[in-house]
Image (cartoon, grey):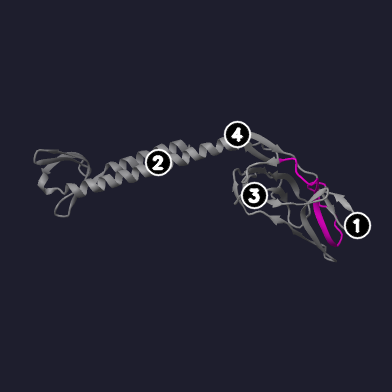
Amino acid sequence: MRKAVFVFLAFALSLAAANFKLYMKDGGFQLVREYRIEGDRIKYYSVERSDWEEMPAELVDLKRTDAEASAKKEDLDRHAQMISEEDQAAAELRKEIMKIPQDPGVYTLENNTLRIFKLADASVHDNKRRTILQHLTPVPVVSGKSTLETPGEHSQNIVTDGRPEFYIQLSLTDSFAIVKLTPLKGYRIVEHITVEPVVNIYEEEREVVPTFTKQLTESGLYKIWPQDALPKGEYAVIEYNEGKIDARIWDFRVQ
C-alpha cells in the first residue's frame, strides 16, 4: 500500500513539474508542457489548449523561464529523495523489529546478533528482614526505610558499548528506565523505598539515567538508550509500576 501511494505521488509530482510557465517579456506567461527554439521562433505545447503553438522568440523571457523550470525540477527531486529515504528507513525498521522476540524481556543486537538478558533476582530489605520479590506481585513493606536489591556486587552481563541500545518488550503497560545501581558487599541497591506510616504510601528513589526512547510496535516493544555515554559501573533496565514495589530488573555492567 505504501509503495502504491509513493508511485502515485511521484507520478502526480512529475506531472505537476512537467508543466511550467513560459514567461513573456511583457510580464505575461503561457502554461506549457515543453518548448523548443526553431530559428527565430519558439514552438511550445500549450497545456490550456492541448496543442502545439508558436511565437517569435524575441517575445519570450527565456532566462526567467529556464530558471523557474530548473528550480521546480530541483524541488521535485528533493521530494522524491525524501520519500525514497523514508521508505528505506521504514524497511530497515521492519527488519530490526523482526529480530526481536515478542516475549516480554530485554534484548540487544550486538553485531546484528540477538542477545537475551536474564531477569535478575530481587529482594526488599528493611531493618527486620529481607523479602524475596515475587515478580509482578508487590510485596508488603513495613513503615520506614527499605531498599530494593539484586544479589552480587557485579553483574555477569558485561556491556562494552558506553551507549548500549536495549529493546524492551513490556509485560504490562508499565514504566521503564535505565538506572544506576549502587554496589555494596554482596548485593547492589536498585532503589531506596520510604513507606509513610498509617497511609502506607510508597516513595521510591532511584538513580535514573537520562535516556532516549522510541516505541517500535503497538504491542509494547520499545528501544531505550542513554543520552550520553555511561561511565564504567553497574546498571539495570527496569520495568515497574510506580509505588507498587514490583520492579523487574535486567542488570548489566559497563566495562
Q: Amino acid at mark 4?
A: Asn
* Between discs 1 and 2, the one toward the N terminus: 2
Q: Is 46 above or below relative to 194? A: above
Q: Residue at x 64, y 43 (%)?
A: 166
Which residue is denoted by mark 1 in the rendering? 128
- Spatial distance from mark 4 to mark 2, Cα to Cα? 27 Å
Snapshot quadrant of residue 200: bottom right
Q: Position of residue 250 (x, y in %)?
A: 73, 44
- Spatial distance from mark 4 to mark 3, Cα to Cα? 22 Å
Residue stretch rendered in magenta on the structure: 134-157
- Spatial distance from mark 1 to mark 2, Cα to Cα? 65 Å
Front residue (pair 3, 38):
38
Q: Neighbour class for label 1 at 10 Å: few (<14), some, many (≥20)? A: few
- Spatial distance from mark 3 to mark 2, Cα to Cα? 36 Å
Task: Report the mark closest to the observer, 1 or 3.
Answer: 3
Q: Can the viewer see residue 208?
A: yes
